[in-house]
Image (tube, helix red, strand yellow):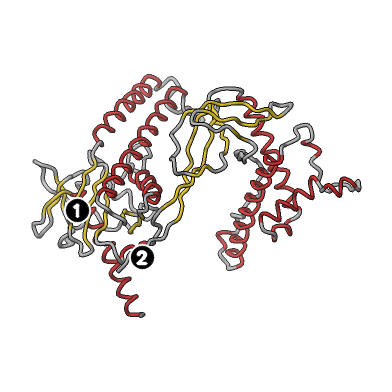
Amino acid sequence: MIEQKKSGSATTAYKLRLYDRHLDWIKNTVDLYNQIVEFYYKLLLEQQELLELDNYKLLRQLEILTIGTRQMKAEGKEIEYSLNQFLNAKPPIYFRRAAINQAISLIRSYKTRYSIWEEKVQAGQEKFGTNMPKKAEIFRTHPVFYKGMYRDFTATSIQLKLFNGKKWVWITYPYTGRDFPKEGKILSPFLKVHKKTAYLHVPVETVVQDIRTVNERMETEKTVCAISFPDHDNLAVCAIMTKEGILVDSLFVHEGNTREGQRREILLKLEKSRRSRKGSGREIKNLKGEVSKENAVLLKKLEQINEYYAHQISRKILDYCIEKEIKVIIVPNYGKAINFQGKQYLNTNRYRWQGRAIIHNLKYKAFKEGIVVTTIPPYHISDCCSICEEKIRRYNEGHRASKDYYGGKLFICPNGHKGNTALNTAKNIGKYFLRRFEKVSLEESRND
């Protein structure tokens, strides 16, 4: 069978830190942008019949309503919704259009949520009655810079057109950030301000050579990669399996101990701070639930450590799959259904267990490489033997096996099968997927 691949595209936002220069100008521009967004949002609330138009025609109609046409100006006709309040700023055409499109997006989102809510209420789902979607009241959107609002975009700097409070000026901002891919297409960037730092988020579109679905891939693929996410030195364990469920290769992704060493150092500082402040009314959180400045810095470092390792581990997994020519990756779907209380090693604390973060990063990174990540329900993937499906007992060297020993890195089942618990979990993930896929294939063949 000749393998037919479908191509597509993926968009990734690259975060650039702008050097501190005229932050007040950036804030003026952001404020003005949100004022214009609010103006058009309220206009659309009054003229909701306009939403029947497509976005391009709607934008044009809004411009006619607010700035008129040359003919209207020549005839001296009054503009129904004048932009007089913004005359001093004289917003450039592309700045205004970006704000209009933002307002259209916000109002369409509100209308969609309202329609869904209305349908549920009419269907008698009373619990939704008090959750009516609210109209936007506070506008904190991020200015999108269409071409004409930025220029001279080099590898180290960019010129932005900003409002300094009196007029529009061009200013060059040096920046730091990741290099853009050579084959990528740069789309309209948007501006964000966090405290005293400004960031430019630049969407970059790249071609994806293979966007086939899981079912389409499984018609030709001979192997898949299943992954488990323990929480000790191995932050991820990969198991490459054939369609018959036979293990052909595995990878143990370490660095958990290194991460724990870095985390422990920060946690000791937090504990020391807690003890020194105890009884003084100045603990990690005060009576208002606010975190002290120094502890907020430490907590931020914990988040950064987790973010770093989530990216590192997902990259190592992906490189391994690319090397082994894997096109289908299977991971557990760690949603609300999983009983974290029954599995204490999967701590929900965002500073601890990283499975979800690794999976999140892996999904978008894999898609860009033409690899699909699919999920299975996480039921009984870690408490059953992957060979005979009997309940397992866990243990470490020198300890007695127990079914409740969640930290045990080794396992044994009633039939004498032994091995690594994380690899056993990965094999179960792969086998459960393959079993479900076989059922789908059988049903499809029967229908044919």
Q: Which residue is drawn at 13% across and 50% down?
A: 419
User: Foreground: 261 or 343?
Assistant: 261
Q: Residue at x 53, y 24 (%)?
A: 19
Does residue 196 appear to the left or right of 322 in the view shown?
right
Where 216 falls versus 20 (above or below)?
A: below
Q: Which residue is drawn at 45% across and 31% down?
A: 177
Give the number of marks.
Answer: 2
Where 289 falls versus 447 (above or below)?
A: above
Lower sequence index among marks 2 and 1? 2
Q: Which element is circle 2 on?
A: helix
* Numbered mark located on residue 424 in the image: 1
**Badge 1 amino acid:** Asn
User: Foreground: 339 or 318?
Assistant: 318
Residue 328 position, x and y percent, is 31, 57
User: Foreground: 115 or 330?
Assistant: 330
Q: Mark 2 and 1 residues: CB-CB less than 8 Å, in contact?
A: no
Residue 97 position, x and y percent, is 68, 44
Location of residue 82 (image quadrant): top right
Where 78 falls versus 448 (above or below)?
A: above
